[in-house]
Image: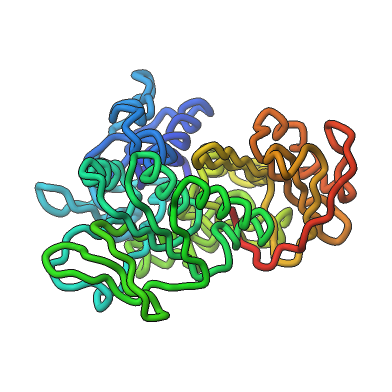
Amino acid sequence: MPLRSVVVVGASLAGLRAAETLRAEGFDGRLTVLGEEAHPPYQRPPLSKQLLAGSWERDKVDLRIREDLRVELRTGTRATALDLTDRSVTVVTANGEERIGFDGMVVATGARPRSLPEAMVPDGCEGVHTLRTVDDCIALRAALQSRPRVAVIGGGFIGSEVAATCRDAGAAVTVVEPAPALLHGALGPDLGALVTEIHREHGTEVRTGRAAESVLGGATVEGVRLDDGSTIPADLVVVALGVTPATEWLEESGVRLDDGVVCDSRCRAVEVEGVVAAGDVARWDFDGLGGAVRIEHFDNANHMGAAAARALLHGDSAEPYRPVPWFWSDMHDLRLQMLGVPRAGDELRIVEGDRAARRFVAAYGRDGRTVAVVTVNLPARTARYRAAVEQRVPFPPPPAESRQAQQLAPVARGAAP
């Protein structure tokens, strides 16, 4: 059907890139972007780093919206239902409920942080935080001014970055992680152990192989009890247990959901017309990574928003979305960058640099092919290995600098970085 009006649900990075691409590709109709938060689109990576640390001011995270974009941006507008029969989305604003019609839709609602079960937190207890929005970040930053004792529940990327930022701010920090090491699922045991070692060197207590059982306190947090019966004193708890796709408003719509909006290789929602998805909320068919995947990183949202917009406009003539996944993470004096997505059982070798000096490039191999590369404190090297990952060259890939590769242990448990 002809596109006269497009609604982008989600004033996110992916949503903004979709809107920009629609205009760049010739869409001249009505373009509406709906955002649940009161803020215009902003970037999320600094929330666990620069903005939380106070080295960036609030306005520095905002994304620029060009004046010539001709978009109706409606913040404070929460989508609650989608009707594909009459092509409308129901939204709730400060003024009540209304329905907005569309010909085409981009779903870019992102994800929501997982919380602790209610039974784990005393009623009315203040001091338990999650970190997903800019408001979450500002509240957490204010709480850090008193130099509290901080317990971080979860040692993935957000938990590890928050722990490093809090420790650098002078807080006493303890991280609780059920796996044997921080980032164990994303990086494997060897590199996970390296990250854990660096956190401990900077004064963070890391309790691996343990899970939180309950938050202790009354009106405010006093500590966290672990599954071995031990207690961590704490004035503030940060829950970093990952996210779930924000799809509750689509549950009765007919859009297929399975850990996100299920999409084909071009980011089009399967079995429905005129709906595409992008960013953290989208799970799309990508044979280069072995089937349906969902990736929760800035670079993916940036490029997937554009790919989804092209699919909405051009249909089958649009190119399938086949990125080389890339992300970065900064913690203390450690800068990680990764291309690709390693899995359980992948072989890992250092192909360049020195692990002892913590400046090296390591590659992940599967079935004799290179599937991912991580650089540690060598960010300028990352781009040199993009083609190796994209083309699945024989493993290990040729090093940018000749050096004998060192064999490391296999990845014990895999997860999308």
Total numbered circles:
0
Q: Residue furthest top?
A: 68
User: Does residue 391 appear to the left or right of 197 in the view shown?
Assistant: right
User: Does residue 292 appear to the left or right of 26 in the view shown?
Assistant: right
**Residue 111 pos. (x, y %):** 40, 55
**Residue 157 pos. (x, y %):** 50, 52
| Residue at (42% x, 67% y) in the render | 254
* Among the 4 quarters of the image, the one containing residue 377: top right
| Residue at (83% x, 55% y) in the render | 407
User: Does residue 83 appear to the left or right of 176 in the view shown?
Assistant: left
Figure check: 81 above or below 35: below
| Residue at (27% x, 41% y) in the render | 141
**Residue 372 pos. (x, y %):** 73, 49
**Residue 20 pos. (x, y %):** 45, 29
| Residue at (54% x, 37% y) in the render | 333
Colour convention: rainbow
In the foreground, 257 or 193: 193
Q: Is residue 315 visible?
A: yes
* Among the 4 quarters of the image, the one containing residue 117: bottom left
In the foreground, 29 or 267: 267
Figure check: 324 above or below 176: above
Q: Is residue 276 visible?
A: no
* Among the 4 quarters of the image, the one containing residue 234: bottom left
In the foreground, 53 or 291: 53
Figure check: 78 above or below 401: below
